[in-house]
Image (spheres, grey):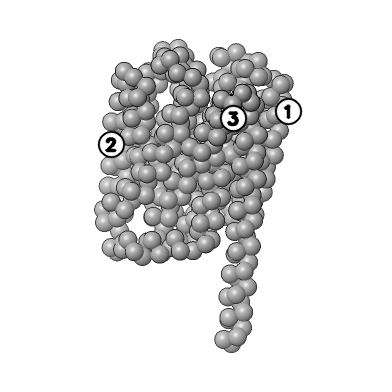
Amino acid sequence: MPLALFVLGLTIFGLGTTEFMIAGLLPELATAFGVSVPDAGLLISLFAVGVVIGAPTMTVLTSRVPRKLTLVTPLVIFLAGEVLAALAPTFGVLMTARVVTAVAHGAFFGIGAVVAADLVSQDKKARAIAIMFGGLTIATVAGVPMGTFIGQQLGWRATFWAVAIIGAIGLIGVIALVPRQPRDEVQRFGRELAAFRRPRLWLALATTTLSQAALYSAYTYLAPLVTEITGFTATAVAPLLMLYGVGTVLGSWLGGRLADRNLMRTLAIGLVVLGGILALFTLTAHSTIAMVITLAVFGVASFVINPALQTRVMNISPDAPTLASAVNISAFNVGNALGPWLAGLAISSGAGFLAPSWVGAALAVGSIATALASIAADRRRNSTRTHVATVSA
């Protein structure tokens, strides 16, 4: 695999760390700004909203710009957002900083996936995307626990400064090692939009949204779940998140290989496992040993579907890969916003910290339904093509 893929993965590590680390810092941030834990969870939802807006918007605005420049620009914006967050005097300023970094995050992910896929042959696309997303999984293994530990020991501001340093290293790596990829042709916005007339694309985007909503409804509130329900101490949160992260690394690697063999089968089975694990949380949360095992499997199930989700959208839209990729990143983050919001409502209603698991399981059922509908749509399309070819012959 090209070295540039691993550079992209390193950069995604920094972006992923700032996206996820809030989950481990919710209690500290709630205390620092005098807000409730569900209100602090809005920092995750608001970040997701920023990605939803930023990914397709920046893709359209940079449609005639060489791809390498579209990777460098968001990283500069990302660094500015991290510095603003580290200096934030109020909760409102911190929320603003999260939006700034989210816009950059979404844009980089969207174009990065296309660059990664273009660096390899067709039969290795899912694995290439898995390597890039591997930075995200390493963020859950090392970045998020590191951020949680730094925040607990040195204060939450130190965490944002640490991520800013990682982002600067990633920026240097992209400038130095990612090859230039000028666009082959002028992209016409109307042509890109035409891809969104396809029902199969909307089914794929719906599957992405629902699956991520299911995942993040539970992930966002893991810290209070393991401390308030399972009985772990606050210092155990970081190693527990690291355990989850180890599972995501395995899941991403496995998902890339399996998706290159049979994409939709990998996706469907992965979603069923995810839904099952989320439902299982309601039983295992009362046992420390069972919770440890469930968290590890949850990590695998969370990321085994990601390469398939991204590759599916790009395969459906070969004439509009950049915009479709960016919109799918938005779909990821619509789910990232929807899940924590619904889970927060459930907690605020008095259902307790087990409620996010039930919310996630219900959302996972929805994602399974859209994935099965996609499989059915593929079969109908293939059957129609076969019939037309037979008649023509």
Q: Is residue 203 left or right of residue 352?
A: left
Nearest-to-viewer mark from 2 and 1: 1
Identify the amino acid type marked 3.
Ala
Which numbered disc flags the more N-terminal residue, 2 or 1?
2
Nearest-to-viewer mark from 2 and 3: 3
**Spatial separation of the CA atoms under disc 2 and disc 3:** 38 Å
> In the image, is residue 45 above or below residue 263?
above
Residue 363: % across, % down? 61, 42
Q: Which residue is drawn at the image coordinates 60% and 53% (left, top)?
A: 370
Q: Quadrant of the C terminus?
A: bottom right
Seen as rendered, the residue at the extreme front is 349
**Spatial separation of the CA atoms under disc 3 and disc 1:** 18 Å
Identify the amino acid type marked 2.
Val
Q: Nearer the viewer, residue 346 or 200?
A: 346
User: In the picture, residue 193 is in which quadrant?
Assistant: bottom left
User: In the picture, residue 160 is in which quadrant?
Assistant: top left
Q: Which residue is mark 2?
A: 76
Q: Which residue is mark 3?
A: 346
Identify the amino acid type marked 1.
Leu
Label 1's element? Answer: helix
Q: Which residue is mark 1?
A: 283
Say whether marks 2 and 3 touch (CB < 8 Å): no
